[in-house]
Amino acid sequence: MKSLRVCITAAIVITAVSFTVISCKREQGQVLNMATTTSTDNTGLLDYLKPIILSDTGINLHWVAVGTGRALELGKNCDVDILLVHAPAAEKKYIEAGYGIDRRKVMFNDFIIIGPKTDPAGIKGKSASGALSTIALKKAFFASRGDDSGTHKKELFLWKEAGISSPDKQPWYIQTGQGMINTINIANERNGYTLTDRATYIKYASTLNNNPPLIILVESDSTLKNQYSIITVNNVKCPKTNTALAKKFTDWIVSPKAQKLLGDYKLLGKQLYIPNAE
Amino acid sequence: MGYLLEGVQQGIGLLFSGNIETWSAIAVSLQASLLSITAALIIGAPAGFVLGYYEFPGRRQIRAVFDTLLALPTVVVGLVVYGFVSSRGPLGHMELLFTVSGIVVAQTILILPIVISLTASAIESLDMRLGNTLITLGASRRQIVLTSLYEAKIAVLTAAVTAYGRAISEVGVSMMIGGNIKWHTRTITTAIALESGKGNFAMGIALGLVLLTIAFTVNASLIILKKMSK
């Protein structure tokens, strides 16, 4: 039985050590659980804000980064206190259904359509919906997120605007079901186009020494605005959520100080978000 | 291609620089996988013994069920456990969602079939005379279980290593139940998923190497244990 005993002792020691390592990080402040979209996490925005939030409000922000569709679902199931998402139409439905309260605009940036430098379908400089109908007409490869994220919802809206019902089963339309960077990479491998938020694109370009094979072809179209809002999970439906703390956080993020911080946040020297709280 | 080499360099750097973020993920991974393998062995080894040792009606069917569960996909475990531990689920009051304890529960469910199925096989392959000898020597029921498991120790150890490998390398459960929260529930595998999502492929490879190093350490210590027990 010696080996068994050694084995158990080793397991206990390692577990104890890892517990100590974890408990070394002192827990400060009150924990506020937030569900948010992958872009705010992938660009490092929340890591940048977290220590400032703690010192200003005493809130220890915990977040899970998922697509906007799933973030709203987590809110419905009362698993988080607050949401930071970017799909205005879905958010309004969510509020109307009584799941959320106190929705406030926080900031915006914009979506862009990117594609190969050679631009095989010739969409450069067109409007967003014009570009999409050209892509459909020429049957050029288009990579879609296909994951009910905010970006995916925006893309579906743009197809509607372009008067195309649903390119769901077309051979040139690839639904990746993955995050933004992976989707951009798939578009690149297939020499195709995709819709992305500008922040993720800047991050993507930086990993390729700012000389990416996919370049911006369509931008600055009013339909490409990407609005981020904050929503408090309704505690009438979810009595256990911390509404008071969520209110404190909401008040902070729309305050002039936080709004300035959002505007000042830069990735590789480029501004990512434009604050627009009212 | 370049990122592979870069990843190897970064991986070595990460392990030795004492990068606090990496070590936090390593600690969470170790903690979750060690607790889940301990729980799975405590429940699974006796259960596997019963399935492998005794003849009773329905034994074959139960074994077939556990053999099938070896193919349990991690996301399915994640989804089912999420359904239970979500605030609206039947176990919501236990507040297991987005905690390491939640990951442990789900990982235990994931690897339990491995422990049960492989332990049962190990006991089945023991010399049938062992049990009879023990009985004639007047061994108690508890002594029979422990001695049989001890005689099959190498095979049971292999079951434990296989199950541990699955626990520490899975990403579906940790992502869905843990939520990949930095400093709290971020494991090595969810960190890899996050880094590749950010486009930092080199960092992803580096963390992959860290994971392999841990797996190697576990296996190496088991080989030493095997040698010591001979």
Image (cartoon, rainbow, N blue to C red):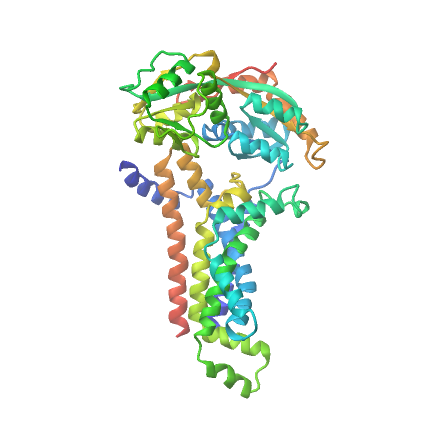
Residue B80 location, x and y as percent? 57, 47
Q: Is residue A243 left or right of residue B35?
A: right
Residue B13, by quadrant, is: top left
Q: Position of residue A216 (x, y in %)?
A: 35, 18
Name the image quarter holding the C terminus of chain B. bottom left
The answer to whether residue A8 is above or below residue B56 is above
Position of residue A208 measured from the top left corner of the image (x, y, whole percent): 31, 28
Is residue A236 left or right of A42 when viewed as pictured? right
Q: Is residue A269 above or below residue B218?
A: above
Residue B104 appears left or right of B223:
right
Q: Nearer the viewer, residue A274 or A54?
A: A274
Image location (x, y in percent) of residue A111: 44, 19
On screen, residue B44 versus residue A239, left or right, reads: left
Q: Residue furthest bottom?
A: B136
Q: Is residue A1 visible?
A: no
At horizontal 40% and vertical 55% (from top left) the residue drawn is B215
> Which of these two is toward me, A81 or B185?
A81
The quadrant of the picture occupied by the N terminus of chain B is: top left
Q: Nearer the viewer, residue B52 or A107?
A: B52
Is residue A71 among what the camera can see? yes
Residue shown at the point (60%, 40%) measured from the top left: A27
Above or below residue A109? Residue A37 is: below
Of residue B211 and residue A26, the one placed in the foreground of this image is: B211
**Residue at image point 70% right, 33% down:** A237
Count of labels in the image:
0
Which residue corresponds to the image point at 57% horizontal and 72% vertical from the top-left?
B57
